[in-house]
Amino acid sequence: MRLGFSAPAAALLAVLSLYPLVVLVQMSVDDVTITNLLRYWPYVGFRNFQDQLTDPTFRTVAVQTLILVTAILILTLVLGFLLAMVLRENTRLNRITQTTMILVWTLPPIVAGSLWKFLLASDGGLSDLLVRMHVLDHPTAFLSQSSTALAAVTAVTLWSSAPFAVMVIKSAILDVPRDVIDAARVDGASTRQVVTSVIVPMIRPTLLILGVLSVVGAFKAFDFIYVMTRGGPGTSSTTIPFLGYLLAFQNYQFGAAGAVSVLAMLVVLVLAMGYIYAVRREER
Amino acid sequence: MSTLAAASRGAGRPSGRTLTTALALFVLLSYLVPLAFVSLAAFKSNAQIANDPAALIFHPSLAGFRAVLNRDLVQALWNSAQIAVGATAVTMIVGTPLAYVLARTHSRWNALVIGVLIALQMTPTATAVIPLFRVLVALHLLNHLGGVALAIAATTLPYAVLLLRPYFLSVPVEVEEAARIDGAGEFTCFLRVVLPLVRNGLSLIAVLLLIGSWGEFLYSVSFLTSSSKYPLSVLLVEQEGFYGTQYNNLMALALISSVPVVILFTVVARRLTSGLTLGVGK
């Protein structure tokens, strides 16, 4: 009976999630291009991996991925905590702000990305605003210059993922028992001390889990990159999973794409173990 | 929370409240202004946008909407609806029993299954799409809305199961035992007794899945080869290349694509916060 309940899910995952991962690993050690994608794949050992690991493009992309992920991790936790503290009281302004933020969070990434593509264009809103405020001296297309593309993608990803972080951190803050805070106040703790010595330590497990989730989210980001920059200019806003996609569906080098994607999956495995560790720690 | 408020007042900082209000207002504007800006842009002519993208006072024009309201849009709306409903139905039908089993059994396998689900949930779709292409070709599901829906379902299944499990954990075992004594079989008990008790969780997760699969883009653009099968997300990105910088059309299309999401959002807005935080560390 137990088996009957889990069999349909097991079948779906086996065919469309787990078996594809086996195909991916196979692809990474074979010579696969568009000409033989649907036919025989000759084995080439670890050549695809060697090619990628020595390729300067892959190395640049790996560094960019690290920058994007680190920036999102730090900014999500810091801004998320700050905004959660700001929005924690149940006032009308805070309710409206939170509802607006969550609405943005539910927008399809393709829609949010298109919206910012317009706002960040040289004739779009932000550039216009900054020129009027004399911050910029000429209109700038943030997404089409390699010095700002990655930062712009990072900022937009953060804009759309912050609402979730704020929501989660806020509910963790509200779960801190009042008497603990009261006790700290009675002992003469200042507001700052209440925050750093009571609230932050008590919600640390939530922050840890949220940290892993935001790293995963940043690492997975596809739609925003695709719709805003297609990973460009050049590869200046490409991440490792996105490079795998470009190699497969733009260059039709499926073997190379397989190798890059297997490397991406290794990162995912490390993150998954980190997440399980974080959850276990909280449950204890 | 009032204790914290008292704490800030007690610290002798009357400006604390003003600062908090100012910050909240700033955050609200940073979300509201971009939304308002593009919503207005959808009602401007392209010349007006080029002239002054930020103008608040202008003659509203429906040119953008007129340009995108055509047969392709209706077809794309229908395709998106089919993909979203199909993917959500498959995920819920297949995922709910698994979440139930994972909440009710305590074998060593559970931890392993949950671990695999977590890893699958973290797999980038950009990675999954590469081998999936090959698999869908083999299953003759390429260029089928059903193939896209199944691929989405496989991707969202781990997420749904992990979010649904806590709801089943909160159902007391005694309820089921009572039903068993009355002679209900395991399946009847699950269907008639347990599911009604977690219907709030089920509907919330279903709505989240609908919202997510409505906007799905990568699988659709990769697995659908004929443009008559494109959902809205793909149409939106395609139009961008077609119209170039005709932002009024693009923003009109973006607004239309968001309408179902906004409707679904208003249905669940109240329950969203508690339902999601249940999955994160609770």
Image (cartoon, coloured by chain):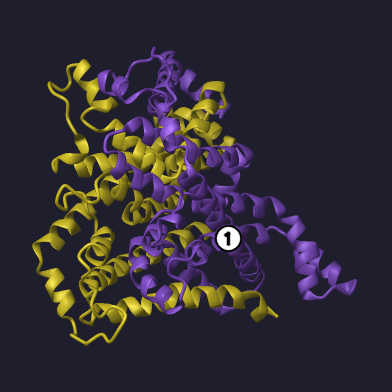
Which quarter of the picture shows residue B253? top left
Kind of element beneath mark 1: helix
Q: Nearer the viewer, residue B174 or A258?
A: A258
Mark 1: amino acid: Gly
Classify residue B248 by image quadrant. top left
How many residues crowd mark 1 within 10 Å: few (<14), some (14–19), many (20+)?
Answer: many
Q: Which chain is purple?
A: B
Can residue A163 be seen here? Answer: yes
In the figure, A35 relative to A229: above or below?
A: below
In percent of the image, x 24 and y 72: which residue is there?
Answer: A254
Q: Which residue is mark 1?
A: B86
Q: Is residue B281 visible?
A: no
- Note whether B147 is above or below A225 in the view shown: below
Q: Chain of mark 1?
A: B
Q: Quadrant of the N terminus of chain A?
A: bottom right
Residue B63 appears at what percent x and percent y? 41, 27
Who is closer to the viewer here, B211 or B246? B246
**Camera-side residue of B179 and B126:** B126
Q: Position of residue A181 (x, y in %)?
A: 53, 34
Q: Which chain is yellow?
A: A
x, y (%) of residue B178?
A: 86, 67
The answer to whether residue A14 is left or right of residue B33 is right
Residue B123 appears left or right of A252: right
